[in-house]
Image (cartoon, rainbow, N blue to C red):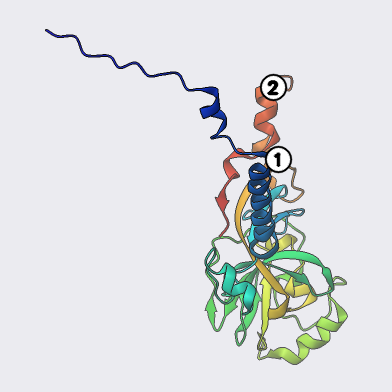
Amino acid sequence: MSTPTQVAVPAPHPHHVWQHLPTLPEACASLLGTVVFALFLLTFVVQPFLIPSESMEHTLLVGDFLLVNKQVFAPGGTTRNVSHLLLPYRDVQRGDVIVFHYPQDPQRYLVKRVVGIPGDRLHIEDGRVTVNGASLDEPYAAFEPAAPNPFRDNFPGTVYTDPNIDPAWWKQLQSLTRDGDLVIPQSDYFVLGDNRNHSKDSRFWGLVSRQAIVARPLVIYFSITRPSSTDVQQVADDRLGHDRQLSARLAAFARWERIFRVVH
């Protein structure tokens, strides 16, 4: 039986190796292209945010880092035409989680959920939202323990009972109320925090204009373990074990199970 012929492969000449490596100008050009693309994404398409409060529990927790889609609700124009290939766009819908400029301080960004869109007739009774005569299905809503608040739980109220209510909004609210319902004007939206008993939202400071809406959360890309002052279930997350063990500290540092979770 013949032995298979072995073919000797010559060792690559050093010149042949170096000619496949990028030159310094090529490497710089590649790096510059990556930086430009990243800047394009951060400027026109996505943007990172950190959740600082409990108002959107349990959808968003304190310490969640978000990437938001800045194009999904963008107006028409050159930017939209360029970036629509990366992320689709549409109008704001009831149930959307949105990022917007805070009406009382446009330099600040808030994140809440849209529960009322233009033309809706909305009211809240015992904390439950009714829109156009039908109870809204809200599996995302949480009701952490809190002191009773008639205005918060039964909206729109007829008596100015809470000092947190913006006086200008209270005056406008009276003109928008019909037969116990808030009638939402065109180009305005009513938003609530998912943590209903611990959220300052449209009940207290008013409507969000369409022009103020800037983005929709896409995904939680990281989440640092932070205590919550309202979530009684957070105690279950305290599983440090032996504090001096590196593995226990790493496990407790972040909410690893939330990484890359899509926001709904």
The amino acid at mark 2 is Leu
**Mark 2 lies on residue:** 246
Vertical comparison of 199 with 183: above or below: above
Residue shown at 70%/42% (left/top)? Answer: 224
- Which mark is first along the chain, 1 or 2? 1
**Residue 113 point in image, percent of width and height:** 64, 67
Label 1 sits on what residue type? Thr
- Is there any visible trace of residue 60 in the rendered image? no
- Circles 2 and 1 in contact, beta carbons < 8 Å: no
Q: Looking at this view, is 165 or 116 the one in front?
A: 116
Neighbour tally class for label 1: few under 14, some 14-19, many 20 plus, Cα within 10 Å: some
Q: Quadrant of the C terminus?
A: bottom right
Residue at (65% x, 31% y) in the render: 251
User: For the residues marked 2 and 1, what is the alpha-carbon distance in whole angstroms?
Assistant: 16 Å
Asked which quadrant contains residue 250, the reply is: top right
The answer to whether residue 40 is visible is yes
Is residue 4 depicted above or below 263 in this figure? above
Residue 115 is situated, as x and y percent measured from the top left of the image, at 61, 73
The N terminus, quarter of image: top left
Which image quarter: residue 130?
bottom right
- From the viewer's perspective, is 104 left or right of 67? right
- Which of 27 and 124 lies nearest the eye of the viewer? 27
Q: Nearer the viewer, residue 215 or 83?
A: 83
Residue at point 66% right, 46% down?
31
In the rendered image, which residue does mark 1 sit on?
225
Q: Which residue reaches farthest left? A: 1
Residue drawn at point x = 77 percent, y = 48 percent: 229
